[in-house]
Amino acid sequence: MYMEDEAILAGLKRVGQNIFGLRCDRQISLGELSEQTNLSVKYLRKIEDGKCCDVDLFELKLIADCLGVKIDELFKGL
């Protein structure tokens, strides 16, 4: 694996951790977030686990909006 790939995977993991933390802080279940975003629970879980390589900015913006934060909050720590 190339170093760039490792950095991308680490970034995706960090974004997922941030989403998980924000969701838990707001006491929003995966099911509730799924309903609000129209994204499946399985897909959201993959994002939170950092195992989703095809998430796009539109989806991240949708998640951020539902969590009541600006999208840059999802990228904290990168």
Image (cartoon, helix red, strand yellow):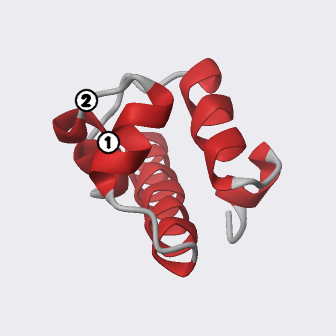
Q: Position of residue 45 (x, y in %)?
A: 24, 49
Tell whether 60 sits left or right of 8.
Answer: right
Looking at the rendering, which quadrant does residue 41 occupy? top left
Q: Which numbered tag is attached to residue 44?
A: 1
Q: Residue at x 63, y 44 (%)?
A: 66
Position in image of residue 51 (x %, y %): 25, 45
Residue 10's place in the image compared with 45, above or below, is below
Helix, strand or loop at mark 1: helix
Total count of labels? 2
Residue at (42% x, 45% y) in the render: 33
Position of residue 76 measured from the top left corner of the image (x, y, whole percent)? 72, 66
The residue where tag 2 is placed is 40
**Is 8 situated above or below 67?**
above
> Quadrant of the image for the N terminus?
top left
Residue at 53% over, 21% down: 56
Name the residue furthest bottom: 25
Q: CA distance from mark 2 to mark 1?
A: 6 Å
In front of the other: 58 or 75: 58
Under mark 2, the amino acid is Ser
Of 8 and 33, the residue lying toward us: 33
Residue 58 in which image quadrant: top right
Tell whether 2 sits left or right of 63: left
- Where residue 71 sits in the image (x, y, percent)? 76, 44
- Kind of element beneath mark 2: loop
Q: Please state which of residues 66 and 71 is positioned toward the viewer in this rendering.
A: 66
Q: In the picture, residue 22 is in which quadrant?
A: bottom right
Q: Is residue 50 visible?
A: no
Question: Is the residue marked by circle 1 packed among few (<14), some (14-19), or many (20+) residues within 10 Å?
Answer: many
Q: Label for residue 7?
A: none
Quarter of the image for the C terminus: give it.
bottom right
Cβ–Cβ below 8 Å for labels 2 and 1? yes
